[in-house]
Image: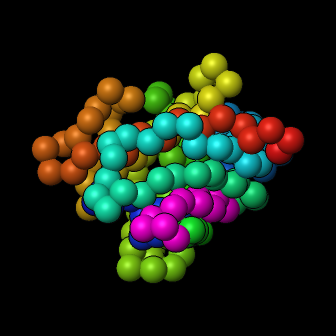
Amino acid sequence: MSRFLLPGGFASLAVCVAVGATRAGPSDDDTKAIQGAWVVTDHKPESEPKAVYVKAVFKGDKLTLYSELAGKNNEIECTFKLDATVTPKRIDFAPVTGANKGQTYSGLYEFKGGELRICYRGPRSTRPKDFNDEGDGKFATTFLVLKRKPGA
């Protein structure tokens, strides 16, 4: 498994609420847009042992990532925050259980052509600068491409 994957290959996210009690901001709009089930269509780089991301489900301020590792189905829940007020947009998440409980994974996200793209690095690393940033020399970047699950 790659250093940048979450234990068991799953993640959940908690959402950052934009400042301003009565007006919805860009992060609120993206929080609504991201809700539901997404199928993982691409995951790079491959990891050892091979973990295969299957789907991601955003519900409220949680994200659950489902994966297959060594023939077993896994899932992990995290809290997450979106920040759509900066360019590129940011996503940070932290597992609520497991060996990396409470440790922040810093990343980027974007909606593009009907897809949700996320790239991130593991705890104790820097945030990717853009979607072409493959690593900081110490930690590689994990890239996920997701499409809305039919019927979700």
Q: At 68% from the left edge and 44% from the top edge, which residue is drawn?
A: 38
Q: Position of residue 75 (x, y in %)?
A: 57, 68
| Residue 14 visible in the picture | no
Q: Which residues are magenta?
A: 62-72
Inspect the magenta stretch and tell me whether residue 144 lies in it.
Answer: no
Q: In the visual, does 101 lie left or right of 24?
A: left
Q: Is residue 57 visible?
A: yes
The reply to whether the magenta stretch includes residue 66 is yes
Which residue ends up furthest to the right in the rendered image? 151
Q: Quadrant of residue 135?
A: top left
Question: Relative to 137, is 110 above or below?
Answer: above
Name the quarter where the N terminus is drawn.
bottom left
**Where is residue 34 drawn, in percent x and y?**
70, 42
Q: Which residue is more in the foreground, 151 or 63?
A: 151
145 to 94, vertically: above or below: above
Give the residue furthest to the bottom.
Answer: 98
**Residue at the front extreme, as displayed:** 71
